[in-house]
Image: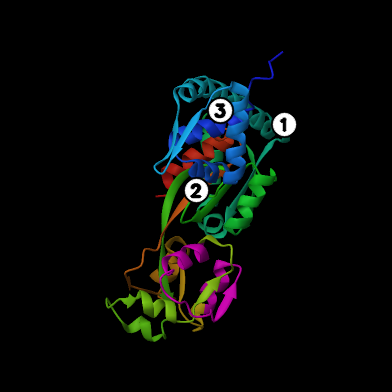
């Protein structure tokens, strides 16, 4: 039996994250816990080991010599635990006979169906069994909740940063675009850009709170007072239809409005001084790598094709 001096896996994972980030606060954020909880875990581990493991200063947190030694041992233990975690997750997927995926609406409507078709075709060509795939389309915040609760095996979200407390991999980027209906005054501006202040002060047609699109927009205009939205919808399609009908401008992913811009149903408007780029992430619970099998294949395929 293991002696009572052996720290638990969560504490070892925390120690390695502090060693990598050199910050207790940053490590706590990455692992989805409070800084107080992180400090408590380190103190408990130091009591078990009988030696200080960290030295804190204004520059951050540094491992002591004993901390570096324990971190070396911990790295092998955590790596083995991640392999076990990934294997168990793969067994659960295989036992259920399908891969459950949740994705934010932009990804679900414009990217994920193609990835799923390509995944099935690739596995069939390789002589492997085609997985049964199910998809839930919702906003990014709900996708994160579904992954955390274990309701789905894998999630795809969009936003300015990766969600806390989950493993993730960047699979692509998407640029948000300001669009208006053909009769809107901004449609006649040509190459003359709208300023960030103009965009912020204009009532917009927006997605609901919790969507990746809404979050990126609000972060991009954080230095300006935003006007209340003229309309709010829980689907990208509804936003597009309202803008085309003349309700006002909106900010949507380029993937979502590409066809509308090509047919002049919507007009793209240039904006100066605003970064509207968002990152697309795959997210999952457990080990450093997605579960073996179709989940890992789907993430790799998304990273190759999302752009």
For the residue pair 298 and 76, the one nearer the viewer reads as: 76
Crowd tier of the residue under label 3, counting other residues whose Cα lies within 10 Å: few below 14, some 14–19, many 20 or above: few
Question: Is 221 situated above or below 81?
Answer: below
State the residue at coordinates (68%, 29%): 91
Q: Viewer-nearest of labels 3 and 2?
A: 2
* Disc on res. 95: 1
Which quadrant of the figure contains the N terminus?
top right
State the residue at coordinates (54%, 35%): 296
| Residue 134 seen by the camera | no
Q: Are the residues tagged 1 and 2 within 8 Å (C-beta)?
A: no
Q: CA distance from mark 3 to mark 2?
A: 29 Å
Please check the rendered image and state whether residue 220 is part of the magenta-colored stretch, yes or no: yes
Crowd tier of the residue under label 2, counting other residues whose Cα lies within 10 Å: few below 14, some 14–19, many 20 or above: many
Label whose residue precedes the other's in the sequence (1 or 3): 1
User: Which residue carries the number 2 mark?
Assistant: 281
Question: Is 106 situated above or below 303?
Answer: below
Q: CA distance from mark 1 to mark 3?
A: 20 Å
- Span colored in magenta: 213-242
Label whose residue precedes the other's in the sequence (1 or 2): 1
For the residue pair 163 and 296, the one nearer the viewer reads as: 163
- Is 223 left, or right, of 162 in this rendering? left
Q: Are the residues tagged 1 and 3 within 8 Å (C-beta)?
A: no
Q: CA distance from mark 1 to mark 2?
A: 26 Å
User: Which residue carries the number 3 mark?
Assistant: 127
Q: Which image quarter: residue 262?
A: bottom left
């Amino acid at each position: 039996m293991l002696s009572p001096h052996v720290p638990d896996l969560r504490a070892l994972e925390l120690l390695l994250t502090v060693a990598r980030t050199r910050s207790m606060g940053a490590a706590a954020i990455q692992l989805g816990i409070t800084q107080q909880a992180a400090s408590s875990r380190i103190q408990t581990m130091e009591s078990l080991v009988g030696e200080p493991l960290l030295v804190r200063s204004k520059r951050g947190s540094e491992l002591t010599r004993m901390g570096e030694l324990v971190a070396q041992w911990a790295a092998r233990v955590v790596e083995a635990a991640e392999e076990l975690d990934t294997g168990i997750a793969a067994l659960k997927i295989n036992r259920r006979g399908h891969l459950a995926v949740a994705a934010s609406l932009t990804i679900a409507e414009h990217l994920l169906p193609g990835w799923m078709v390509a995944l099935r075709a690739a596995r069939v060509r390789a002589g492997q069994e085609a997985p049964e795939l199910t998809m839930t389309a919702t906003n990014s915040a709900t996708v994160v909740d579904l992954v955390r609760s274990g309701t789905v095996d894998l999630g795809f979200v969009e936003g300015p940063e990766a969600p806390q407390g989950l493993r993730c991999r960047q699979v692509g980027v998407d640029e948000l675009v300001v669009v208006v209906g053909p009769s809107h005054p901004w449609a006649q501006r040509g190459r003359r850009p709208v300023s960030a202040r103009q965009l912020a002060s204009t009532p917009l047609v927006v997605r609901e709170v919790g969507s990746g699109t809404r979050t990126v927009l609000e972060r991009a205009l954080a230095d300006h007072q935003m006007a209340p939205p003229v309309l709010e919808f829980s689907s990208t399609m509804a936003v597009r239809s309202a803008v085309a009908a003349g309700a006002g401008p909106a900010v949507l992913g380029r993937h979502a409005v590409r066809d509308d811009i090509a047919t002049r149903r919507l007009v793209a408007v240039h904006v100066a001084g605003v970064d509207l780029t968002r990152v697309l992430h795959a997210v999952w619970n457990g080990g450093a790598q997605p579960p073996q099998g179709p989940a890992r294949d789907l993430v790799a395929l998304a990273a190759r094709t999302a752009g």
